[in-house]
Amino acid sequence: MLSKTFGSAVYGVNATIITIEVTVGQGMRFFMVGLPDSAVKESEQRVEASLKYFNYRMPRQKVVVNLAPADIRKEGSAYDLPIALCVLQASDQLVAQKNLEDYIIMGELSLDGNLRPIKGVLPIAIEARKLGYKGFILPAANAHEAAIVNNLDVIPVENLKDAIEFFEGTKDITPVTIDTRDIFLSTHNEYDADFEHVQGQENIKRALEISAAGGHNAIMIGPPGSGKTMLAKRIPSILPPLTLHEALETTKIHSVAGKLGAKAALISRRPFRAPHHTVSDAALVGGGSFPQPGEISLAHNGVLFLDELPEFKRTVLEVMRQPLEERRVTISRTKWAIEFPANFMLIASMNPCPCGYYNHPEKECVCPPGAVQRYLNKISGPLLDRIDLHVEVTPVSFDQIASTRKSENSTAIRERVIKAREIQTERFKENTGIYCNAMMPSQMVKEICDINPAGKILLKTAMERLGLSARAYDRILKVSRTIADLAASPDIKIEHLAEAIQYRSLDRESWAG
């Protein structure tokens, strides 16, 4: 007898439907075909143990499991549940009152028949609804994640027995439903860290406000203990709230990577990722034999923070250059290429030299001659060109630390950022894929960032003295446009341009060592 149902495989952030067919006939062996990997092949042992636990049996006949289409490689352990149900139906141990072919079924079985959570549930649920399946049967731990998708019955099952009884019609399982919009609106402005708790550093807060308003990349340079990491962690709290579309897009990536956790639903706050400097190329940009999203994709629609930037391997930093420009990363393999979104704000921090005290107002730098230049040379010029704002962070004085005066909170800063972003949304409404000033291509910069003759003289002088590249020229104009937007000015004034030029600290000759 032949039994058939459907599962899914996730490639990139999109799901592909997989047909699972099982036939039981004459013979004595178990065969699995359709390019299964080792984890899929091992499902035979998990399925057999689970069936025995609930007093069912694995047929002592020829069992053939086919995973179609046969030319796509199947990976992971999530095919256990559909294979087990098809084996039972094909061997007449399951008399189903509900049609297995109406459902997408996924789940990893433990040896006692319980179901473990799986990865990539959200894109699978989206594909199931798109193709008109009646429901999605999956581990209970993943149910809230799948329930983000409306107009699809999300059936949570704790174990194999629950799934059997559901299809036999002896157990009613209520589909999980959640109010996505209510969850989104109730938590999208909640952040643990707030700029209110940062004493002093007003110039740094201003630079980070500009960075958030225009989506600009920024690097903070300062001695140890000056507050670089603390400031970076508060940046998501001043970014505009995620839209529902951005939240779904972000949740899909985290679902594919298995980062949502049990009972998780919609990600409603902008992500903040801070990988350690020992991170590998593949872990940062994504990759592996079966490509998974890296840190830059997990930071999509949020912030990627690289603490102590020169300590990262140079090869790791260089692979970021293309994603920073294109806002996506393409991972190519022999038979396919997978694309992950990577629209993130890069925030980096670094000490000014190996000892950390170069240009310090009080402490003396003890680095040998040339050490500062060698330290800075760990970061390539092309990468620095892609960072719009270079901000010097100075230590906070005792009086500022001891002050009881409250600083401006993140909510007030975020309101100004949102107003500036609204101006940019109106400006780019005719341009698909451009949402903020940092995303403007070079040809658009010339049209939108027009400056008066006095501004051109100022910029020419700065370019010659600092030896700036053409890319740095564009960055200065983009930042000055953002500063003008924060001031609600239709034109870029000379003071906006001057402020933008001062955020090119690492281009100055004083950093040559």
Image: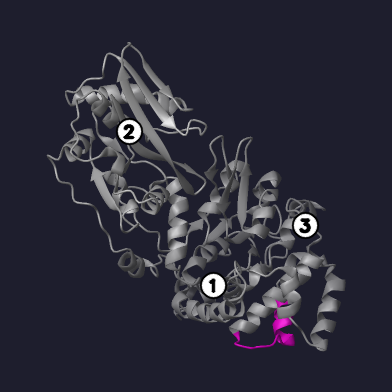
* Location of residue 62 (image quadrant): top left
Q: Residue at x 18, y 40 (%)?
A: 166
Secondary element type, mark 2: strand
Q: Which numbered disc, 2 or 1, marks the residue closer to the eye?
A: 2
Q: What whole-number distance in Å separates the C-alpha atoms at marks 3 and 1?
A: 36 Å
Disc 3 target residue: 381
Q: Residue at x 76, y 67 (%)?
A: 472
- Residue 513 position, x and y percent, is 81, 59
Q: Which residues are magenta?
A: 487-500
Q: Residue at x 70, y 59 (%)?
A: 352
- Residue 409 position, x and y percent, is 45, 77
Whichever of callouts 3 and 1 sits on the residue coming sooner in the sequence is 3
Residue closest to the eye, 9 or 96 = 96
Q: Is residue 487 left or right of residue 36?
A: right
Q: Is residue 441 visible?
A: yes
Give the amino acid type for the residue marked by disc 1 in the picture.
Phe
- Residue extending farthest to the left is 170
Colour option used? one colour
Give the amino acid type for the residue marked by disc 3 in the picture.
Gly
Q: Which numbered disc, 3 or 2, marks the residue closer to the eye?
A: 2
